Image (cartoon, helix red, strand yellow):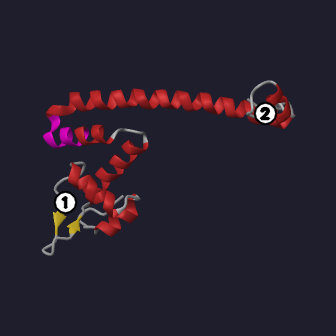
Amino acid sequence: MADEGREYTISEVAELTGLSPHTLRWYERIGLIAFIGREANGRRRYTAHDLDWLRLLTKLRATGMPVADMVRYAELVRRGAGTYPERQRLLEEHRERVLKAMREQQEMLRLLDHKIEMCRRGTVPEPPREETARAQGDARPGA
């Protein structure tokens, strides 16, 4: 958790969030983050609120949310409470995509577990030898 009232440099924010300074500047350019304060010399100064927002964006991105959807969500947040229904719809649609991806990953994990168990038991069928495959008209071993 960031200290309320403290300001952070772009380097500190990069270290705290795992985002590069280049990514932070890009996020600002495309509207994912807005209204970053500046020092008199133009250097960015991030607040605890900015850090919290960046952590949310990082989590959304880690779930596979497209950047365009993240930008739309950021726009809706900036427009205020009247956008709750649209924000909810956007998040629910993304939630369904995440659940689908999780089901697919679970299916792949079950397949891997099955193959690992076959290896443990020594019951993995061996692919045909290269000579056998060629004789059968397929030059790829194990095809």
Q: Quadrant of the C terminus?
A: top right
Please report the bounds of the magenta region as a residue range: 73-81
Residue drawn at (26%, 59%) of the image: 25
The vertical placement of 3 against 52, above or below, is below
Decide if residue 92 is on the left or right side of residue 117.
left
Q: Reply yes or no: does residue 6 show up in magenta.
A: no
- Is residue 80 rendered magenta in the image? yes
Real-space Cα distance between discs 2 and 1? Answer: 53 Å
The residue at 39%/30% (across/down) is 95
Q: Which residue is mark 1?
A: 36
> Residue 66 or 46: which is nearer the viewer?
66
The answer to which of 127 and 39 lies nearer the viewer is 127
Picture coordinates of residue 24, whole percent (x, y):
30, 58
Q: Are marks 2 and 1 in contact (CB under 8 Å)?
A: no
The residue type indicated by label 1 comes to Ile
Q: Which residue is mark 2?
A: 117
Dot 2 falls on a residue whose secondary structure is: helix
Q: Residue at x 32, y 57 (%)?
A: 23
